[in-house]
Image (cartoon, coloured by chain):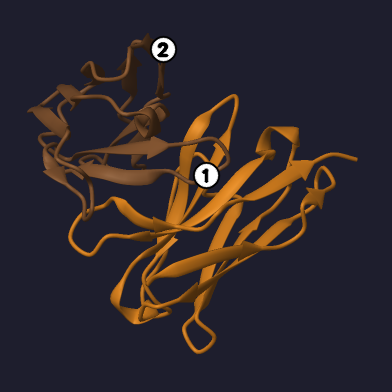
Amino acid sequence: EVVMTQSPATLSVSPGESASLSCRASQSVSVNLAWYQQKPGQAPRLLIYASSTRATGIPDRFSGSGSGTEFTLTISSLQSEDFAVYYCQQYNDRPPITFGQGTRLEI
Amino acid sequence: QVQLQESGPGLVKPSETLSLTCSVSGASMNDFYWSWIRQSPGKGLEWIGNILSTHYNPSYNPSLKSRVTISIDTSTNQFSLRLTSVTPADTAVYYCARRAERYFVFDFWGQGALVTVSS
């Protein structure tokens, strides 16, 4: 199965700044990669799919890029509600689809 | 608005069977794939499997395939998960989710159900 590795495990950023989160696949997943946001006590929320396409209702301060094995989620002008855990997910090689272990974005 | 809600026992004894049901509203079950995903501190998010309808075979995570059954009842707008021979390692929050129409990503999720495996 494809192993997804996210870095860093925790990222500390101030409100108003930008954050870049990394996701690496153990083999090429083309652009078949998604990003989710999860807040405490809630289910994950789909942010990005197909590496760079924002899901319905997602603000344009969230952007995704990458292909193959290297992907980045960039959040610009961080707002208080953006501090959460972010997961990447590959769906190129399945079953199974696999998730990264998450990056915690903290103030 | 699509809504999903998990239901089932919150405590299961080791070696017994975990059973959960997901009730769906706001979407036609025949038009989408429906999935189970679990989340534990030790293993993070883990896809368990998905089902389209009663006319197609479900797809399962190979690591769980020998113990998992996912079924669907479109007449009641529900789909279900059965996981046999559970151990404490199966303790997790179990989510049901809808797979998006064109991509193997999950656009609607239930709130999650915590299932603890303990005697």
Element type at mark 1? loop
Chain with colour brown in the figure: A
Q: Is residue A95 visible?
A: no
Query: What SS does tag 2 mark?
Result: strand
Which hue belongs to chain B? orange
Tell me, yes or no, if residue B4 can be seen here.
yes
Classify B96 as above or below B37. below
How many residues crowd around disc 2 within 10 Å: few (fewer than 14), some, or many (20 or more)? Answer: some
In this view of the protein, which residue sits in the foreground, B63 or B77?
B77
Chain where mark 1 sits: A
Question: Residue A100, position in %: x, y?
Answer: 37, 27
Kind of residue at badge 2: Thr
What is the quadrant of residue A37 in the picture?
A: top left
On residue A10, the disc is 2
Q: Earlier in the sequence, mark 2 or mark 1?
A: 2
* Residue visible at 67% across and 39% down in the picture: B90
Seen at 54% across and 35% down, the residue is: A40
